[in-house]
Amino acid sequence: MSQNVLASSAGVAAQAGRRRTFAVISHPDAGKSTMTEALALHARVIGQAGAVHGKGDRRGVVSDWMAMEQERGISVTSAALQFSYQDVVINLLDTPGHADFSEDTYRVLTAVDSAVMLLDAAKGLEPQTLKLFEVCRQRSIPVITFINKWDRPGHDALALMDEIEERIGLKPTPLTWPVGIAGHFRGVIDRRTEVFTRMQRSPGGADLAIEEEMSPEAAAELYGADWETANEELQLLAMTGADFDDKEFLAARSTPVLFGAAVANLGVRQLLNVLLELAPPPSARPTVSGTDKPVDSAFSGFVFKIQANMNRTHRDQVAFVRVCSGRFERGMLVTHGDTGRPFTTKYAQQIFGQGRDTIDEAFPGDVIGLVNATALGIGDTLYVSEPVKYPALPSFPPEHFAVVSTSDTAAFKRFRRGIEQLDGEGVVQVLRSDQRGDQSPVLAAVGPMQFEVATHRLEAEFGVKTQLNHLPYEVAARTDEAGREILRTESNVEVMTRVRDGALLALFPHRWRMRSVAGRHPDLRLDD
């Protein structure tokens, strides 16, 4: 191997070592978008947090760029932010928390090396939180837990530790511990250094928190019973062996825990420093062939998200690509793994919420945006030199179905273009029904809020008002042409074609009906 190749390989490995790529995940309303901005604020890449008074008075969260998100104060799509902090390149992916958008969140989890899980101090573990923890465990994604909203009344800190261990099976290993119960937050003790940091919200809460390191004597004099209680709890943690273990964390068997309040920027600096110190950098990635693709090998990456109309002026489409190996250079010719065709990368950009800047190079762990890459689909692989294929992204069976139509015949071309766009992005699945034809496609979704997003975007981005007619189906199973013929004789059953890949889906009103039909037709193919 030549010296130039060795030097290039070492350079890529060094750049990969500087990357931290993680997702912020949680149940709805736990503070994901607020935390995303608080981290960016601490890295000095924004001047002032946009979410300082909750949903009713937010000034526009950087990661919540879609009109519907800003109007309703919820995240309905994932967003990427890249910035530098202490010579480390942060690739932060904010995710929607609502269960209806689980598919988007789970795709994001395929593109990260670790995750920050937010728990609401008052609500503890909620249903969506449990599901996300389980997904992280299945994918061996290390999770750092941040107990958020400690500036408001909430559960006892030790009780929350017990809940994490008993309900999730991950051993909590607190790195910081709060002085003061939830709602009376004084600051945190760093368990590894035993340093106490007093914390106060800045005036208005939109700037960095006011922090002051204090001696144990000064803290004991100032906070009395709160200080004494915190130290008693620390002794209990030590007795139960709740100490951080790097191997257990990286194996996704334990979770470091920190306390704070993202909306007031309390404890956020500590979290950011822990991410730099403990979160793993990119490493060799498993491929379909069963081998691992080293980070210092030739360029490869995969598309985990497609988003259109992020910029209303340009009306373009962006494919989000996670760089898995090698050095990406803008303009380089790569191979589209699914077609084997060459693909040019002239329009490559760095993403920061809705904002974008042209980039010339990227390294493993980075998320790049390829503009107007309409040939790319979610899950597609890009590579140079040796062919590589990464595992398929997760797909959820739809449980809600509705016919979408427009009465405005003059807008039909825009209607079809919008439906194709939403299908390509994975906002909804689009089905074709022989009974209804192309003018009335059927939308299939994991949750009903996806329908709201689809109809809102059709009107806001394509100028098309639509009507929905919900269908009485709850279960979809793949079948084949023989199955389609068999099911023609069955009532309350319909077979439709999924436009994205041509798959035939048999729709049933409930699982009992599907089992009943399958019992009468033993040769019928039905795959969930």
Image (cartoon, helix red, strand yellow):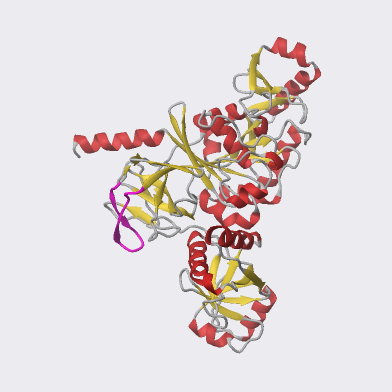
The quadrant of the image that shows the C terminus is bottom right
**What residue is shown at x 58% (from left), y 45% (from top)?**
64
Q: Is residue 481 above or below residue 37?
A: below
**What residue is shown at x 55% (from left), y 49% (from top)?**
78
Looking at the picture, tell me which residue is in the foreground, 339 or 191. Answer: 339
Q: Residue furthest right?
A: 225
> Is 255 covered by the magenta stretch?
no
Which image quadrant for residue 408?
Answer: bottom right
**Residue 31 locus on image (x, y percent):** 65, 40
**Residue 303 locus on image (x, y percent):** 43, 54
Q: Residue furthest left?
A: 2
What is the tally of numbered marks visible in this picture?
A: 0
Asked whether residue 2 appears in the rendered view, the answer is: yes
Q: What are the residue bounds of the magenta stretch?
A: 331-347
Q: Is residue 89 above or below residue 464?
A: above
**Residue 144 locus on image (x, y percent):** 59, 37
Q: Residue furthest bottom?
A: 489
Q: Is residue 525 above or below residue 160?
A: below
The quadrant of the image that shows the N terminus is top left
- Side (left or right) of 473 relative to 324: right
Which image quadrant for residue 474?
Answer: bottom right
Asked whether residue 75 appears in the rendered view, the answer is: no
- Side (left or right) of 233 relative to 33: right
**Residue 479 locus on image (x, y percent):** 53, 77
Looking at the picture, tell me which residue is in the foreground, 418 or 12. Answer: 418
**What residue is shown at x 30% (from left), y 46% (from top)?**
298
